[in-house]
Structures are given as C-alpha cells and as structure tokens.
Image: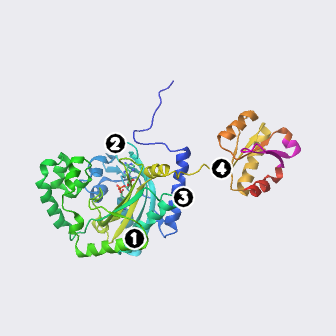
Amino acid sequence: MAAKITSIKGMRDLFGAQLRSWRRMESVFSTLCLRRGYSEIRTPYLEATELFVRVLGEHTAVVGKEMYSFVDKKGLPLSLRPEGTASIVRAYIEAGLPYDSPHARFFYMGPMFRYEQPQKGRQRQFHQFGVELFGLASPAADVEVIALAHNFWRELGLTENISLLLNSVGCGDCRPAYIKALQAALQAVRDRLCADCKERILTNPLRVFDCKKPNCQAEFEHLPKIIDHNCDACRSHFGEVKRGLEALSIRYRLDPLLVRGLDYYTRTAFEWRAEGLGSQDALAGGGRYDRLVAELGGPQTPAIGFALGCERLLIALETAGSSAPASSASIDILPLDPESQFLALKLQAELLGATSYTVTVNVSGASLKTQLKQASKNAAQFVVIIGETERRSGEAMVKTMATGEQKSVAIQDLTRFFPLLG
Ligand code: HAM
C-alpha cells in the first residue's frame, strides 16, 4: 500500500457534527453583524511581513516566535496572517475609506496562522470571527462592540461559565510615564524573573505580563498597575465604558494585569474567558487601537474591535451542551433500479424546490435492505422507496423512520405531501 500523507501538525480537517456547529456559528455571527450595520471584509491570507512587525510589535510573541514567514520567488518577505486587525487596517487605508466614510464597521471570519505548540484549543491554523469599528472615539463605541460579542454568546446559548475581563491600558499621553515606573519596578525584581522577562524589561516592558510562568506571575501582583497611571481623559473614558456596560446589564470583572499580547492597544482592553477550555481559556479578546491607522499612514482615526477563536468557541459550546443539533428534516429517496434512479433525481429537484427538507438520493444500486440501513445511519426522517412496481402504479412508498409507519403516496403528490408534514 502506498504511504499515506497526513495533515500538518496543528492544522485540522473539519467535517461532520463539528462543521455543522461551525456553520451555525458562522450564520449566527454574520446575521448578527449585518443587522447591526457591519459589512463583511475579506483580506488575503498573505501579507508583507513588515505589516505584522509594525502593527503587532517586534517584541510580541506572535511576531518574535509564531509567524509563518518566508521569502517569495522575487525575494519579498511575506507572512501568513497571524490575526485579522493588521490586514483590515491596511485595507481600510489602502481603499481610501478613512477619507470618504470615516465611520466604518467591518466583520470578518477566516483562518489565521501561528506557529504555537498545539494543544486543546490551540492550533497552528485556527479561525477567528471578528469585528473592527473605525472612526468613533466615544465610550459608547466600546460598549457597542462588547455588547455585540455578548449578544453573540447569548444567541448561541452560552450564558453561563463565561466571564468578561476589562482593563484600560492608557494612551500615548499617560503610558510613557507608566512604562518608566514599570521598568524601574522590574529592575528591582530582575533576578527573580525568567530570561525572556529580563530581556523584555529593556525591549518592551509591558510584554512581561504575557509571561505565564508561575514565578514571574507571582512578581506581577506587586508591580505598578497601568490602570493606576491612566490620565484623566483615559480614566473618564473608562468610567463611561463601565457605566455603559452596567446600563446594558453586561457583567464584567476588572483585571489590572490584562494588557493583551499585541502592542497596538490603547485605553479599553478586554477578554472573555470560558470554562472548559483548560489553560487556553481566552475565548475572545480585543480593545481600542486609536493610534494604529495613523501609524500605518492613514489620518488620525480611532478604532476598536475584537476577535474570537472558533475552535475554542466550539469547545465552550460542547462543554455548555449547546452544540448544533443534527438536521432532522431530511428525506432519503431509495431507488431500486436504474430507471428509478433517474426518476428519483427528478423528484429530488422537485422536493428541494417545494420543501425545506434536505433531500438525498441513494444512487448506490444496493439492495433495499442495505439502502434502508444507510438511510438510518444518515438519520433520515423519511425514506421514499421507488422501484419498478411503484413506477408502474405511480405510487411511492413513504416510510417514517422513527415509527416504521409506511404509506403509499402518489408520486405526483409527493411535493404536496411533505410540506403538509413539515
Ligand atoms: P488575540 O487575543 O491574539 O487577538 O486572538 C483572539 C482570539 O483568537 C483568542 O482569544 C483565541 O480565542 C483565538 N486564538 C489565538 N491564537 C490561537 C491559536 N493558536 N489557536 C486557537 N485559537 C487561537 C487578536 O487576534 C486581535 N486581532 C483581536 C482584535 C481585533 N483586537 C482588536 N480587534
């Protein structure tokens, strides 16, 4: 036997029940976004490496260790996108949108790539759904984006075992003084930190908080907190965000150590954690990034967004017992000879047009017994049996699989018979 080729580590195939849940998530998410005025955006999976280096930050784990980067045949450094925000900001500026439609709402769904150690809820190709809202600086915009995600969880039936963590990571005015205070405090405990954190003290001190090592985490409790260094404008913005969330009865928990793993955030930063995800419990995350559009060559434009991990959402839904039910409204047509197969295909088209049932035709040519076995494996609700006798009499046999009840129905009446049942 020829050697088998397997999928790449950390990259998975999706089918069956998982894909059914996935499609349900996609459909709920896109409807929810479209009905709130967000339009879909699709950007290429490959971008110039420089885009991610500039947007996410050179010293972040994503850029430093996790990107799939290569040089193309012309020598251009390219990378598979590790997240969506950078590409969407690039596309927004490139299309000239900040100039003619300063308020823009986008949503997106698609694969992202990070070279991480695969484990439950963590893959090298994973998928995100997200939104990005441009041009609005008001705290109400933060509340709008957080409420959108909140409503998505609710529509999927995920109401318990999920928590929203909130912080304010300051702005260009107040962060430099905080970074200085943080650097000084880190220097004082330098010896107790891991090698990566020691390096970050000089390169990008805020990134120490991304370290998950227990020894380092124990030190973080005592470090100065960014929220205590917020300027008046940031403090007032954050106060309004919290008031808005309370007005919408969205529960949150303040987490002064939440700084998110990417460099572009300003002011509001947030993350949802879900039970059942083990150590990879960040279900979604986002925040404001008011400087990014200008840093990438556009006009000064405030922005905010979030993204959620689809694989993690699937696990959270399974844990909460809220996976998509198998579609039960289905008819399998079982033709017993070649002539009946053609008639069955014609009937399939008619039934698909007249009803909302899933209709499949068994064209295997197998015996009735085998076809019935296959139909029950497919969880068909009804089967329609057509053989030579049925063609002659013009009456098909319709069997209700759950009860075993059989009924003769005129073939020409089938398109009226099923809608009456449904
Ligand atoms: P992020 O926190 O890096 O943010 O990723 C968002 C979500 O993607 C995470 O909460 C997690 O559910 C999922 N995720 C990340 N890495 C993996 C992985 N290796 N395997 C499975 N799931 C993963 C961003 O990407 C920002 N662009 C979010 C944002 C949008 N901020 C503003 N706008």
Say above or below: 351 vs 361.
Answer: below
In whole angstroms, how far apart are the C-alphas of marks 1 and 2?
Answer: 36 Å
Q: Nearer the viewer, mark 4 or mark 2?
A: 4
Residue 173: mark: none
Residue 245: mark: 1
Q: Position of residue 295 (x, y in %)?
A: 27, 66
| Amino acid at dot 2 | Gln
Residue beneath the point at 29% across and 57% down: 262
Ranked by sequence position, the earlier of labels 3 and 1 is 3
Q: Which residue is mark 2?
A: 117
Ranked by sequence position, the earlier of labels 1 and 4 is 1
In the figure, is residue 375 to the left or right of 389? Answer: left
- Nearer the observer, 17 or 411: 17
| Amino acid at dot 4 | Ser
Badge 4 crowding class, 10 Å Cα cut-off, few under 14, some 14 to 19, many 20 or more, is few
Ligand 1 found in image quarter: bottom left
